[in-house]
Image (cartoon, grey):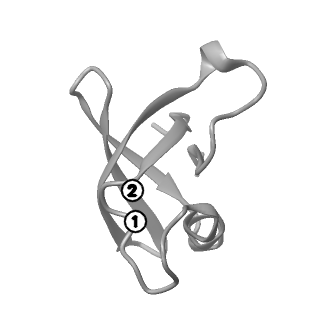
Amino acid sequence: MAHDRIHARKPTHDLDRWSSGEIVETAERDGHCVVTVKAEDGDIVELVVTLAIRDLFVSRLDIGEEASPVGERVWYRKRGN
């Protein structure tokens, strides 16, 4: 399975290859994390990442330990199907 890329902070390289948006929802599906993002152009994008990547990018968001990542800005690259 091809996984998408997601960052909690603005990337410092290849900026033209990254998009940004606001997290609308996170859910688990088939042992993976699906992060639904509202892109800057208004499109809804589903990103599929491993649970470990979810834990990593959520830990880097400027939110409390138990807080939801919904509403936070992220940068992403869609790679999956």
Residue 70, percent across and down? 31, 62
Image quadrant occupied by the C terminus? top left
Q: Is 24 located above or below residue 53 in the figure?
A: above
Q: Residue at x 46, y 32 (%)?
A: 20
Q: Is residue 3 left or right of residue 35?
A: right
Q: Nearer the viewer, mark 1 or mark 2?
A: 1
What residue is drawn where x is 64% and y is 63%? 60
Vertical order, 63 against 23 (above or below): below
The percent position of residue 24, horizontal first and vertical second, equals: 26, 53
Q: CA distance from mark 1 to mark 2?
A: 10 Å
**Is residue 30 toward the left or the right of residue 8 in the image?**
left
Q: Residue furthest right?
A: 13
Secondary structure at badge 2 equals strand
- Residue 15 is drawn in which quadrant? top right
Report which residue position mark 2 lands on. 35
Label 2 neighbour load within 10 Å: few <14, some 14-19, many 20+? many
Which disc, if any, is residue 81?
none
| Amino acid at dot 1 | Pro
Other-residue count near label 1 (Cα within 10 Å), few / some / many at <14 / 14–19 / ≥20: many
Foreground residue among 77 and 32: 77
Position of 17 relative to 68 (above/below): above
Identity of the residue furthest to the top in this view? 16
Residue 69 is marked as 1
> Dot 1: what SS?
loop
Q: Earlier in the sequence, mark 1 or mark 2?
A: 2
- Would residue 7 appear left or right of 45 to someone viewing this image? right
